[in-house]
Amino acid sequence: MNAMIVAHDLRRTYTMGEFEVQALRGVSFEIRRGEFVAIVGPSGSGKSTLMNMIGCLDTPTSGSYHLDGLPIEQLDPALLSAVRNRKIGFVFQQFHLLARSTALENVALPLAYRGGISAAERHRKAAAALERVGLGERMEHRPQELSGGQQQRVAIARALVTDPALLLADEPTGALDTKTSAEIMGLFADLNRAGMTVIVVTHEPDVARQTKRLLEIRDGQLVRDVLTADAWPDETHVQKARSRRLPTRQQWRLRHEYA
Ligand SMILES: Nc1ncnc2c1ncn2[C@@H]1O[C@H](COP(=O)(O)OP(=O)(O)O)[C@@H](O)[C@H]1O
Ligand SMILES: [Mg+2]
């Protein structure tokens, strides 16, 4: 089992004065390199909290989390931030682009943070990342000169420029219309086909449908872990065929073992 992510009994409690919110109540799962996963669930169910753990932006109150074999909850903040910069690309609902900077400058920024990379090299890598998301012709545009979908592509290029092993997107289509959302999900699917491990948080079924595996969270607990293809059995013959099959969880495990 070549797992990239191993989460075991993750719990996260937020303390607000005398109140405690249990945002995650014992979540366990594994994700392998090359998977394309949707984390779904209603608002307030703990999706972003979980995403922050996976992305090493936050550590659990208890439980363990290994990313590429590293025990994340045992790393100090400096090491954690180095792991983030090396391994993970982030995409958010609000694109978080610098308004006064061009697309190229925005995309080059994580390389400047990393340090030790010449300006020419940063430029070359940023241009390549923008080409990869189909924005080769828009490099000198500023965010306000781009559509929402194009701005999200810039943000995706910025996430890709450090060549991360893992791409994490929290509600990446939340600010986009249906057609543009489908294009952005198509881009994630292309990246996944090229080998990238992609995890997308969403509460929109149409977005989740475009992934390969579905993790559903409710009230801080994992309630479903299925192949996306099996999540919406909308035709009876499909349902009949399914009833003769192994339970989804076992199928999933076997398919991955024999992949
Ligand atoms: N920083 C925080 N402080 C206190 N409570 C929080 C914080 N972040 C999230 N929560 C609470 O934890 C629960 C899960 O939130 P979140 O992970 O953001 O859910 P989702 O992303 O699924 O909407 C909610 O009840 C939310 O109010
Ligand atoms: Mg959220």
Image: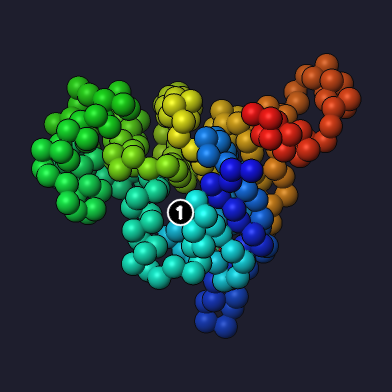
Q: Can residue 55 be seen from the camera position used here? A: yes
How many numbered markers are drawn? 1
Residue 77 percent location from the top left of the image: 38, 68
Residue 186 percent location from the top left of the image: 46, 25
Image quadrant in which the N terminus is located? top right
Q: Report the front residue among 187 and 259.
A: 259
At 62% from the left and 62% from the top, the residue drawn is 10
At 84% from the left and 32% from the top, the residue drawn is 246
Q: Which residue is mark 1?
A: 55
At 38% from the left and 43% from the top, the residue drawn is 164
In this picture, residue 65 sits left or right of residue 113: right
Task: Report whether the residue tagged 1 is closer than 8 Å to ligand 1.
Answer: no
SS for callout 1: loop
Q: Report the front residue among 82 and 230.
A: 82
Q: Report the front residue among 244 and 176.
A: 244
Image quadrant in which the C terminus is located? top right
At 75% from the left and 23% from the top, the residue drawn is 234
At label 1, the amino acid type is Gly
In this picture, residue 1 sits left or right of residue 141: right
Residue 178 percent location from the top left of the image: 48, 27
In this picture, residue 128 sits left or right of residue 8: left
Q: Dot 1, how many residues are within 10 Å of its Cα: few (below 14), some (14-19), or many (20+)?
A: many
Image quarter of residue 221:
bottom right
Q: Can residue 49 be seen from the camera position used here? A: no
Image quarter of residue 153:
top left
In this picture, residue 216 sits left or right of residue 75: right
Image quarter of residue 76:
bottom left
| Farthest residue, direction top | 237
